[in-house]
Image (cartoon, grey):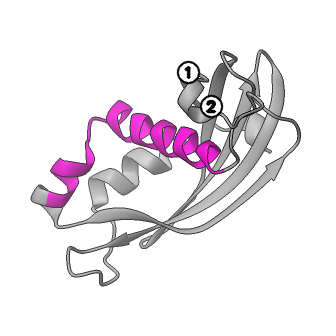
């Protein structure tokens, strides 16, 4: 399914701080890789989270996150995160994200993001941001 969607790529490497005593990436650090990739996607659309907050009184937050670990990253591996916008509605954004070493999928994730205002209440996504995200499908 994700192969027909527009792909956004983020690259990093595994640092010592990301690993456990055995040199394997600690499972929760995958969430950081995926979050950084989503932030870079927002930047690529011409926005940043601070601007969205100040200009539109919105924050994009994780509502649901599901991850499947297939293998493990190890110390000094190169990590590529591929992010795909799958669905966009007035309040929600669904993304598919894959973590790869070379071309091998190490972990797969589905994340549902919601739009809230600074008081934490649901808010409709700004029309321009919705249009830009929708163009990625």
Q: Which residues are magenta?
A: 28-53
Looking at the image, is mark 1 or mark 2 earlier in the sequence? 1
Q: Residue at x 25, y 43 (%)?
A: 48
Quarter of the image where one finds residue 26 = top right
Q: Quadrant of the C terminus?
A: top right
Q: Secondary structure at mark 2?
A: strand
Residue at the far left: name it. Answer: 54
Judge the density around disc 1: few (<14), some (14-19), many (≥20) Cα neighbours within 10 Å: some
Q: Mark 1 highlights which residue?
A: 11
Quarter of the image where one finds residue 98 = top right
Residue 16 coordinates in the image, percent (x, y): 58, 24
Check whether the beta carbons of the residues at disc 1 and disc 2 lie within 8 A of each other.
yes
Q: Mark 2 highlights which residue?
A: 81
Quarter of the image where one finds residue 12 = top right
Above or below — where is 37 with respect to 27? above
Q: Quadrant of the N terminus?
A: top right
Judge the density around disc 2: few (<14), some (14-19), many (≥20) Cα neighbours within 10 Å: many
Q: Is residue 66 left or right of residue 35?
A: right
């Amino acid at each position: 399914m994700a192969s027909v969607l527009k792909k956004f790529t983020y690259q990093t490497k595994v640092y010592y701080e990301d690993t456990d005593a055995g040199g394997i990436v600690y499972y929760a650090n995958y969430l950081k890789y995926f979050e950084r990739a989503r932030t870079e996607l927002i930047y690529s659309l011409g926005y940043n989270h601070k601007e969205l907050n100040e200009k539109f009184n919105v924050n994009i937050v994780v509502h649901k996150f599901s991850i499947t670990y297939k293998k493990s990253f190890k110390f000094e591996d190169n990590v590529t995160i591929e992010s795909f916008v799958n669905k966009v509605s007035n309040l929600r954004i669904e993304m598919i994200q894959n973590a790869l070493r070379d071309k091998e999928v190490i972990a797969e994730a589905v994340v549902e993001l919601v739009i809230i205002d600074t008081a934490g209440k649901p808010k409709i996504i700004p029309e321009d941001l919705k249009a830009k995200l929708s163009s990625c499908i």
